[in-house]
Image: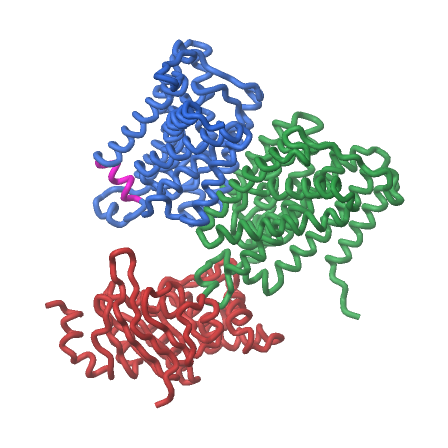
Chain colours: A red, B green, C blue
Amino acid sequence: MSDVILRVENLSKRFGGFTALQNVALHLTAGERLGLIGPNGSGKTTLINCISGALYNDDGTIVFEGADITRLPPHQRARLGIARSFQIPKPFRSMSVLENLRIPLEYAAWSRAEHRRITDEAMHVLETIGLKELAGKSSGDLTQVDMRKLELARALAAKPKVLVSDEAMAGLSGAEVDEIIEILLGLNRTGVAVIMIEHIMRAVMKFSERVAVLDAGQKIADGDPQSVIANPDVQRAYLGE
Amino acid sequence: MSKISPFWVSAAVVLAAGLAFTEIVENQYYFTAIYLILQGLIMAVAWNILGGFTGYVNFGSAAFFAVGAYTAIALDKALGLPLPLLIVAAAAICGLIGLGVGYLTLRLKGVYFAIATLAMAIVLETFITNWSYVGGARGAYILTPDKHLWFDSYSEMLFMLMLVLAVVSVAISRKLNFSRLGRGLAAIRDDEVAAECAGVPTLRLKLVSTTIMGAMMGVAGAPYPFFVTYVDPLSAFNLFVAVNAIAMPMIGGTAHWIGPVIGALLVGSMQEIVKVNISSELNILIVGVMLVLFISLAPQGIVGLVQKHFLKRKA
Amino acid sequence: MVTADLLANAVVAGLLLGGFYAAVAIGLAIIFGQLDIVNIAHPAFIIAGAYTAYILNSRFGIDPVLIGVLAAPLFFLAGAGIYRVYYGAFERTGQESLSGLAFFFGLMFIIEVVLILVYGVDYRLVQAGYIGESWRIGFVDLPFRMLVPFVVAVALTAGIYLYLARTFTGRAIQAVAQDRLALQLMGVNPIRVKQWAFGLGIATAAIAGALLIIIGPVEPSVGRQYIGRAFAIVVLGGMGSISGMFIAALILGIVESLVNTFMGPSWAPAVAFGVLLLTLALRPSGLFGR
């Protein structure tokens, strides 16, 4: 086991009177594959919004590679090495697929990129994701599954140390789900730690080394996938009492 | 020797043609008419940096223009600075105002920025109206200097100056369009949240964008007092100036640097023709109708229509 | 010099003015506050309402308030038609933020210029028996040209408030911005609701316009001064809340009247915009927050 790369402590987030997250603690070690599951509205997306900086948490701290990033804006977290994909794809629609990757390469990964070879680097990412043939295509015209791949490709182009994949497989067919899992496993092999948020349990079980479960804004289980699934609290949260 | 781009060749040709024009043409009407078209062009290019590249609509163009003009009036009166310095000062002050308004409102949704710029225009107009040093509501007269370099008249010199400023503005806009900064702005326009998560410092880039926009608008306004020799708040803060600055890029196309140039030349020339032959009210009406028609039916403007045409032929 | 009667007169004049401002802003409170459509052409519709009152009043001598009420259905239809265009061209394709704004900006200009082309830039006014009259209570003046718009505006505000709170369509309008899905599940078409609400918002402009021209003479470009006022009131009132809007209108009216009395009328136009800029910078959720 290697070192902890991301540590979330005592995290709370409220929207008006509604508590979306309460005292959540979570850690991730470098190169780990973590599955984050929970019923709808349990706070998964809020949690990763707090981690990526799209929302600021009310209480608690977020530590990345030993540095407190709780108050950093999202773009600085992206530069440090936290990348995310969006549940509903948000391509830069006026740009081609290749140009979409230039943005994270030129901004998030700028200090780590070879400036003269941005296009090559972008093509390389597209190749690993399997979008190479579509490089010149307008990103607004992609199919659903290609749009999801573009989300992952763009996150990857930021050269992250941690990738947060937010329901990258919702609504995809079985074969397409396997394709995305393979992509994520491939990424992980290059040393990127991955937090996978997913409703498709088959994908979570196949992919994750460890699973954390959120329910009503609190973490109710965290451990190896088989024991988490067997946990009566988790079963209750999913099936109802 | 590296290859000289066609853009700079065209720019040199335009400037040379402008110089030749001042030597050959006698009728002063042409210089004033083209001056106004070029003024519109600079403002269209400026508006487009924020409105087109970054996707933030700004209704305050007239205010930046007027502040540019009044900066020139005030500094001319106080210190008697030469015109190039007045232009630099106007750029600095209008850039700062752009930065300030941006800082106050750009963290909110885009519509609030748009409304705030409209608000800023009226607040500034009220201040100028109550500022007696620059003439207040009565307006200010400006004496044009006798010197006009080697040109035959002062308006010929202003014409040439405006041509240079226009070429520089277009060059800046073009450079921006194809730069890392410009790609960052385009990402903001397409999806601000995704841009931020891809490492784009969105607030800082938006502020850079408003500052450049403001400075360029100020540059367009600074020579104006010397061109008309009389300025009052009503004419300087004329909302028609703002409409032009929006209509020209929208009609030409906002995503590409050439869009506002095409729009400005087209709309500007049409305006001069209609103004002379028919009436200036009708002229304003035509611009308004064209603006509404284009944004409803061809939101990508003329550039978009041309691109679509070629894509169809290729397919 | 600040004297008691000057101050009292300024405050009372401000209250009356503020009431009228509620009529100006109420359409925008629906259109911008609840439908989230940035209709900066709203004041231009109010000017169109004022000219409607001027035309019918000068030709047939009808009371301007009555004209406003009679013209409201026509304005409603015009508004519903404009929403169709807006929806088809922008909202459906998700481009309303950039292009929609410019669309209304262009619309505002077209209305203004058409009025200038037809009627010129002269100030126009209406005739009615009560316009020159006034009441005097103690040392406070209550001119009818302010009092009548105030009363009509308060009635209009109360009517819209009750309509939104009590009727099914009214509640649907309030729900459309917050929960489209729930509306669809109830079998209500959100586009139809928005079209209806937009029409309603424009219909109020007919009445507000009639009130505007009762207060004083009107020329086509006067509308621009009301852009800032209307938006300042809606934002300050907490976006879409009718009661918040009403209080914000009264506040703005009083502040403007005080500035007018103690600093001079040339500063008054900046008040609304200053309030708007400050609200946006300091407290964008408005005084009463949402």
Q: Measured from the top left, where is residue C156 in percent x and y?
A: 31, 27
How many marks the image carries: the answer is 0
Q: At 78% from the left edge and 49% from the top edge, which residue is drawn?
A: B14
Question: From this viewpoint, which residue is outermost toward the left?
Answer: A241
Rendered-image quadrant of the C terminus of chain A: bottom left
Q: Magenta: predominant secondary structure element?
A: helix
Q: Is residue A163 visible?
A: yes
Q: Is B103 positioned to the left or the right of A171 in the image?
A: right
Q: Position of residue A2 (x, y in %)?
A: 37, 89
> Which residue is found at the position 31% from the left and 36% from the top?
C242
**Residue B12 drawn above or below residue C56:** below
In this rendering, does residue B306 appear at all? no
Q: Is residue C171 magenta?
A: yes
User: Is B132 in front, or is B288?
Assistant: B132
Query: Is C186 in the magenta?
Result: no
In depth, the one of B92 and B172 nearer the eye is: B92
Residue at x 60%, y 75% (from the top left corner): A115
The magenta stretch spans which residues? C168-176
